[in-house]
Amino acid sequence: MLTRIKSTKEANAFLQDLLTPSELESVTQRVQLVKLLIKGVPQREISEELGVSIDKVTRGSKALKKSKGGFWRLTK
């Protein structure tokens, strides 16, 4: 299903239809968090910059370590 999305506009429309505004914000925040982790930004700095708990950053770090490569491809 996701492979049928051909543009950013289509992807945005799909995500807005699929997710609640709160879920969409959470996904956006998680992508920002992962990008910062990939860049090597310290966890405490990420927590302060994004206004999230250090626990949330730690969970993101653990998810990144278990990643099957999707995070790395999508955040370049």
Image: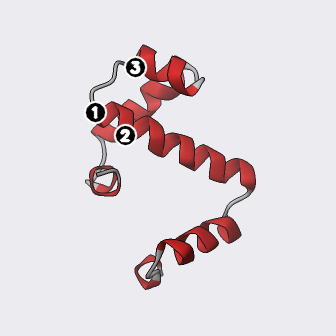
Give the vertical position of 71 relative to 61 (above or below): below
63 sits left or right of 13 in the view: left
- Display coloring: secondary structure
Helix, strand or loop status at disc 1: loop
Amino acid under disc 1: Lys
Q: Residue 67: which disc?
A: none
Number of numbered discs on residues: 3
In 3D space, how far apart are the residues under numbered discs 2 and 3 (Cα atoms)?
A: 12 Å
69 sits left or right of 23 in the view: left
Q: Residue 35: which disc?
A: 2
Amino acid under disc 2: Lys
Q: Residue at x 28, y 57 (%)?
A: 73
Q: Position of residue 42 (x, y in %)?
A: 35, 18
Q: Residue at x 55, y 47 (%)?
A: 28
In 3D space, how far apart are the residues under numbered discs 3 and 1 (Cα atoms)?
A: 11 Å
Query: Residue at label 3?
Result: 43
Helix, strand or loop status at disc 3: helix
Marks 2 and 3, the one that precedes in the sequence = 2
Q: Circle 1: is it few (<14), some (14-19), or many (20+) Cα within 10 Å?
A: few
Q: Residue furthest bottom?
A: 4
Give the vertical position of 72 relative to 37 (above or below): below
Q: Position of residue 38 (x, y in %)?
A: 29, 36
Helix, strand or loop status at disc 2: helix
In 3D space, how far apart are the residues under numbered discs 1 and 2 (Cα atoms)?
A: 6 Å
Q: Residue 39: which disc?
A: 1
The picture quadrant where one finds residue 13 is bottom right
Q: Decide: marks 2, 3 in contact (CB < 8 A)?
A: no
Q: Decide: marks 1, 2 in contact (CB < 8 A)?
A: yes
Q: Position of residue 25 (x, y in %)?
A: 64, 47
